[in-house]
Image (spheres, rainbow, N blue to C red):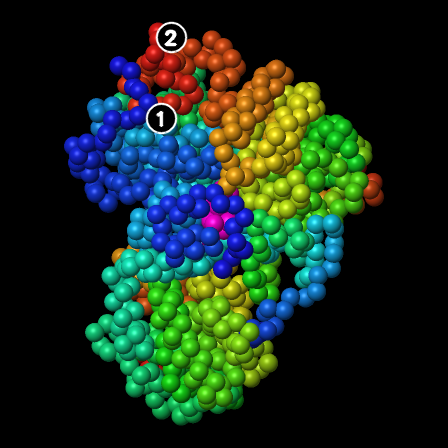
């Protein structure tokens, strides 16, 4: 059958079945419960909020309850949207066709800490910072570190295949999650990993299903439990920040740092002139910097004390030889520790006249190879400049480039754009969607991927996903239809409704 | 110990212009130039204790975040001094 | 409150069916609510005591702001949202941890004010005739008795408000008076007894208030702002009439009321000096005016009262006091970790949802139990009742810091700890 735009009206019978399965306390129908689960951080036209509101919300307390909810929804052909932290930037957790939001935050227990094999098994509703407060007592850490580290949840990291700020050292979510349990769109509970073992990091047995069920933005199932790879809590952290008089010398330096093969290297970041100008608006570290500071680089290392120091000397020597000026311990320590907090402040926004205006932070990201960063930078800034010329409610907050791996092959490339949603009308929104599509096209023209970090299922960029993935996109359609015959799991995302409209 | 007195709390120190867009009233605490917050967003009534509370809490939070991730934050300046002295340059 | 006149009409212009009082509220809160709504990350959530135990996103600080945006858009009404705002202890963790406070609040002189928002939304509900039954009853009884009904069916009254001081020979009036909150005056009387005797031992001159009413803070917290203001006016008038210049406060909740609510009510006319007793005692220790000598053989941890640590940044002085007491083994937990801790006893939560308060206290005691302590020390009488109840199941004693210091100074405190 074909599922059309809106969900069938939820009948009393469905409500009764859900209440039987979960208990009435955990089936929420109030308007506030529903409106507050239509939101993610990505900006949208607030006057269209009602278009995204689900019919009801459930808060299951176990994997079995999640499975039961999915079975009920599948039987009645009701859309389901999984929700973890709801901190994603590509609308994965936003209901596009109403239905039932399955909010898994109650699945937040720590089921096992295996000190000998260095793993832990948790409910997917747990937050990484809170988990690490517990693991710290055992001298361990789960080093999955998104900008949303203090509030995003393990399950959302799986559903979005998250990117980590220290991924160049410890890997990203896909590397750190050894295996997980998930509820398929039919309500069946399975476990996927590298092969069958719960705590296996490398297997050659069977298809590698773990990757298939990561980053699907809630279209293929709901993760309910995960077994995670743990590291010793680092003895030492090293996070030097350097200033440069121009972008080109900073760009050369970051490349050399990333290619140096330092084993404790956890990442390097390059900030361009626009970003530095933006930091001068309100960042205590950059307000007093002299005018000839026009680009910044930082590097980060974690590990055993002796190894971090040895690697640190090498990184400092590379930077010194590349003409970098070290900004000192206070800025270096402070800026790195503030890495989760500096982004999302609306008052960063400025009108063309320089007045403070509350703007929502949005970042367009892509995965771009090192050699293509300068070209992408030029083209992206031009796109945003044209946008601001027409609609002054947009503001260019600069770009940064962040290593995704330990070899310097590709960078999370991000342009941050302030968007004044209070003033956002349909025309400005349409212009923004066009700009997003243009930004994604630049990434593809330069041999990159539309997203390294956030996902690519929002309006605008999502149009180009079939182009990016080519024949792989057809496989996505086939997989979707095979696993979700009734299109109940997060329908409308990634254009996957096509799987049901025509034979792929 | 500091007793609360209304008049004291609502008399901020004079502002020193730091850049075109920032001023400084308390040592090492920058503030936006108030002229930038006259059209779209107005500043709140801010007793002195609140400014100082936030700045101190920020420092405590940053320190906490370092300790959360690693036992020690290595000083780049010390390593750089060693490099410049020639004894770390291998 | 926070904003000047809104500069754009947006959704609010048409009224969206709201009452004028609601329209005024929305104009006041428009930018503040949007400043939260449009922030990328919600660092408030995992430090919120209610969210930690319920995991219900409808009851998060950011939802409280988003509801205002939705009201402005005409999507929600005060009737839709009022009940959700019960789920808050006004501990202040959310608004401190918010990057808009912690990283840029001082820079812009514009910070997240979730506690104010919760109070104002509760008041807006009352203005719109939407009452929570527990709050209404509590405030009616407070109004009748001039004190909060902290003893349940056992009446509290003006004649009994100084009973805790029996035998201590404290004068009435004077330039400096000790203000004792309702919970300490009627329920945990050991706390004011300890404080008064410590002050006497240090040779510090003070009296009791002539006609003390409830500070009015709880009424403001629950949305009954006219009543709160009436109580405040009574107390200030009484202080003025009897020549009071300085008010000593032992309760963190009173400290908030006297340094935030009263200044908002009275502005430039507010000329009373407010002194927090725990800070004064730390100063006495530093000056040698008090010296704890009696060893107290307990293994303790300290519970940072939310209104001191989170809302006022006061966390060092209590630790100075505890470290001066001989015999204690002190397993401290740092102040930032404790931004996530709460007793659940504040903001009227135990009035309307005692079961939620109990879950939050139980969670706090679980944290203490992990440290293998036999005693949890607090500095807030309102936290001590729910914490003590949770402590019983874990064989952890809950003691007030003033009681502990008094014991170590050799004072027989007397009074009741409520058990």
Task: Compare marks 1 and 2 and give the one earlier in the sequence.
Answer: 1
Q: Which residues are magenta?
A: C29-41
Q: Position of C383 compared to B52: left or right?
A: left
CB within 8 Å, label 1 to label 2: no
Q: Number of callouts in the render?
A: 2
The residue at 42%/10% (across/down) is A474
Q: Position of C177 compared to A8: left or right?
A: right
User: Dividing the picture into quarters, in which one does residue A66 lie?
Assistant: top left
Give the labeled residue for mark 1.
A490
SS at badge 1: loop
Q: Position of A152 compared to C343: left or right?
A: right
Q: Dot 1, how many residues are within 10 Å of its Cα: few (below 14), some (14-19), or many (20+)?
A: many
Of A463 and A376, nearer the camera is A463
Give the labeled residue for mark 2.
A504
SS at badge 2: loop
Tell me if I can see residue C295 in this picture: no
């Amino acid at each position: 059958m074909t599922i059309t735009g809106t969900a069938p009206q939820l009948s009393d019978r469905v409500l009764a079945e859900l209440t039987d399965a979960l208990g009435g306390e955990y089936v929420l129908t109030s308007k506030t419960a529903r409106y507050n689960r239509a939101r993610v951080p990505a900006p949208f036209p607030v006057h269209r909020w009602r278009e995204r509101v689900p019919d009801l919300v459930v808060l299951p307390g176990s994997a079995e309850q999640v499975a039961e909810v999915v079975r009920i929804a599948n039987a009645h052909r009701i859309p389901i949207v999984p929700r973890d932290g709801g901190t994603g930037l590509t609308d994965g957790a936003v209901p596009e066709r109403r239905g039932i939001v399955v909010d898994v935050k109650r699945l937040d227990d720590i089921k096992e800490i295996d000190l000998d094999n260095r793993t832990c098994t948790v409910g997917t509703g747990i937050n990484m910072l809170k988990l690490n407060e517990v693991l710290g007592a055992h001298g361990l850490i789960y080093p999955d570190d998104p900008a949303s580290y203090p509030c995003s949840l393990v399950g959302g990291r799986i559903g979005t295949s998250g990117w980590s700020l220290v991924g160049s050292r410890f890997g990203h979510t896909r590397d750190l999650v050894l295996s997980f349990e998930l509820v398929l769109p039919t309500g069946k509970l399975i476990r996927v990993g590298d092969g069958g073992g719960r705590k296996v990091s490398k297997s050659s047995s069977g298809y590698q299903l773990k990757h298939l069920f990561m980053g699907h933005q809630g279209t293929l199932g709901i993760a309910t439990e995960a077994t995670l790879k743990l590291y010793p809590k680092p003895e030492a952290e090293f996070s030097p920040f350097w200033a440069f008089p121009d972008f080109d010398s900073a760009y050369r330096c970051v490349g050399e740092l990333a290619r140096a093969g330092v084993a404790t290297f956890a990442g390097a970041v390059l900030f361009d002139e626009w970003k530095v100008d933006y930091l001068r608006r309100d960042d205590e570290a950059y307000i007093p910097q002299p005018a000839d500071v026009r680009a910044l680089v930082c590097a980060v290392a974690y590990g055993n004390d002796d190894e971090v120091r040895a690697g640190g000397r090498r990184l400092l020597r590379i930077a010194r030889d590349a003409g970098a000026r070290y900004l000192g311990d206070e800025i270096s320590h402070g800026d790195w520790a503030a890495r989760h907090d500096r982004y999302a402040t609306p008052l960063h926004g400025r009108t063309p006249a320089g007045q403070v205006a509350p703007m929502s932070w949005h970042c367009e990201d892509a995965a771009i190879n090192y050699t293509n960063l300068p070209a992408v930078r030029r083209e992206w800034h031009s796109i945003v400049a044209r946008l601001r010329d027409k609609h002054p409610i947009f503001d260019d907050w600069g770009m940064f480039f962040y290593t995704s791996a330990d070899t310097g092959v590709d960078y999370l490339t991000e342009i941050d754009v302030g968007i004044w949603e209070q003033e956002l009308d349909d025309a400005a929104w349409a212009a923004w969607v066009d700009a997003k599509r243009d930004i994604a096209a630049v990434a593809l023209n330069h041999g990159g991927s539309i997203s390294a970090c956030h996902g690519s299922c929002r309006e605008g960029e999502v149009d180009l996903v079939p182009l990016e993935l080519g024949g792989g996109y057809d496989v996505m359609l086939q997989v979707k239809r095979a696993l979700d015959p009734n299109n109940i799991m997060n329908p409308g995302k990634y254009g996957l409704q096509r799987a049901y409209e025509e034979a792929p | 110990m500091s007793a609360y007195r209304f008049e004291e709390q609502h008399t901020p120190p004079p502002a020193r212009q730091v850049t075109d867009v920032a001023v400084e009233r308390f040592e090492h605490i920058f503030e936006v130039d108030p002229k930038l917050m006259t059209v779209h967003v107005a500043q709140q009534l801010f007793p002195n204790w609140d400014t100082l509370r936030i700045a101190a809490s920020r420092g405590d939070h940053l320190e906490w975040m370092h300790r959360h991730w690693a036992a020690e934050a290595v000083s780049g300046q010390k390593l750089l001094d060693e490099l410049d002295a020639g004894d770390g340059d291998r | 409150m926070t904003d000047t006149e809104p500069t754009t009409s947006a959704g609010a212009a048409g009224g969206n069916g709201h009452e004028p009082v609601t329209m005024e509220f929305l104009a006041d809160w428009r930018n503040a609510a949007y400043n939260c709504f449009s922030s990328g990350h919600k660092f408030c959530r995992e430090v919120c005591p209610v969210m930690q135990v319920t995991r219900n996103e409808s009851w998060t600080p950011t939802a409280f702001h988003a509801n205002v945006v939705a009201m402005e858009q005409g999507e929600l009404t005060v009737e839709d949202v009022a009940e959700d705002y019960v789920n808050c202890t006004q501990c202040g963790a959310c608004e401190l941890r918010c990057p808009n406070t912690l990283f840029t609040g001082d820079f812009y002189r514009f910070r997240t004010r979730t506690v104010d928002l919760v109070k104002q939304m509760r008041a807006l509900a009352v203005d719109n005739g939407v009452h929570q039954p527990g709050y209404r009853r509590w405030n009616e009884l407070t109004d009748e008795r001039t004190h909060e009904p902290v003893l349940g069916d056992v009446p509290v009254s003006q004649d009994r408000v100084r009973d805790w001081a029996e035998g201590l020979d404290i004068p009435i009036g004077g330039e400096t008076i000790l203000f004792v909150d309702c919970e300490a005056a009627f329920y945990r009387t050991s706390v004011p007894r300890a404080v008064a005797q410590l002050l006497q031992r240090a040779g510090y001159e003070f009296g009791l208030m002539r006609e003390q009413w409830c500070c009015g803070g709880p009424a403001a917290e629950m949305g009954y702002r006219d009543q709160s203001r009436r109580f405040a006016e009574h107390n200030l008038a009484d202080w003025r009439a009897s020549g009071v210049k300085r008010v000593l406060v032992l309760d963190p909740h009173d400290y908030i009321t006297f340094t935030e609510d009263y200044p908002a009510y009275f502005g430039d006319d507010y000329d009373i000096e407010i002194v927090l007793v725990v800070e004064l005692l730390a100063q006495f220790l530093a000056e040698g005016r008090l010296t704890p000598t009696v060893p107290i053989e307990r293994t303790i941890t300290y519970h940072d009262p939310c209104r001191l640590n989170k809302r006022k940044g006061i966390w060092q002085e209590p630790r100075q006091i505890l470290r001066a007491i001989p015999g204690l083994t002190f397993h401290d937990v740092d102040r930032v970790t404790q931004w996530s801790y709460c007793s659940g006893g504040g903001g009227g939560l135990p009035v309307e949802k005692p079961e939620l308060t109990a879950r939050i206290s139980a969670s706090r005691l679980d944290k203490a139990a992990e440290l293998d302590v036999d005693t949890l020390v607090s500095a807030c009488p309102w936290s001590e009742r729910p914490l003590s109840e949770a402590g019983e199941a874990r064989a952890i004693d809950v003691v007030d810091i003033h009681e502990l210091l008094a014991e170590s100074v050799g004072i027989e405190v007397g009074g009741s700890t409520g058990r």
